[in-house]
Amino acid sequence: EVVGAVVPDLCLRHLHLSSTLGGIKKARRSYESVLFQSGYVRSCEGMDDDEVDGIRSFFEACLEVEKSNATNVTMNVTQKEDTSKMIGRRSAKKIKAKPMTATTTAVTKKEMRHRLRRIYDAAIGFFQEGGNDASAMEYKKRRDEQLIFA
């Protein structure tokens, strides 16, 4: 039966399309509706291997969306800080440029960690509820490594 593997593929395609056409906000809306509102990924119990692999790919794509956004935010923060140093305080006031501060960077980093944790926790719950402890442990390990050193 092919039907089970189709749903994760559609979710993945929708995430990719949302990200490409609408940016990070649309991508988040796409994955949040699947992960946190639909109930579809609460457990892998009763799913065949193809469907589970498809959902695993979806989790990975969600993590990648947030990680790539974090990289873009970090690059933008660095560029804005460098620009504000180059143009000086008076010029910055004239053009109303607000340099990103360490506080802004920390808030952004905190938000990124929160979003990553939610995705990792959804993956862990999905595998734990379905009795796939090995995959749940893999995601726990990655979550802890990613978020402790982030």
Image (tube, grey):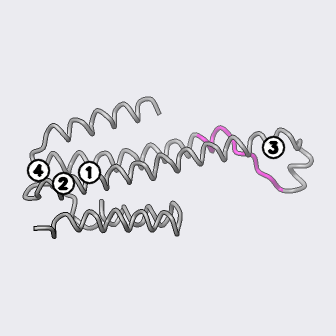
Residue 119 lies, in percent from the top left, at 34, 50
Badge 4 vs badge 2, beta-carbon distance below 8 Å: yes
Q: How far apart are marks 2 and 3 (CA)?
A: 48 Å
Comparing labels 3 and 1, the label whose residue is closer to the camera: 1
Residue on which disc 3 sits: 84
Residue on which disc 2 sits: 52
The disc, 2 or 3, on the residue closer to the chain's N-terminal end is 2
Asked if the stretch drawn in magenta spans residue 69, the answer is no
The disc, 3 or 1, on the residue closer to the chain's N-terminal end is 1
Q: Distance between the residues labelled 4 and 3?
A: 52 Å
Residue on which disc 1 sits: 56
Q: What element carries label 1?
A: helix
Residue on which disc 4 sits: 130
Which residue is nearer to you in this view: 121 or 66? 66
Q: Is residue 100 above or below residue 32?
A: above
Q: In this view, does 43 lie above or below 20?
A: above
Q: How far apart are marks 4 and 2 (CA)?
A: 10 Å
Q: What element carries label 3?
A: helix
The disc, 4 or 2, on the residue closer to the chain's N-terminal end is 2
Comparing labels 4 and 3, the label whose residue is closer to the camera: 4
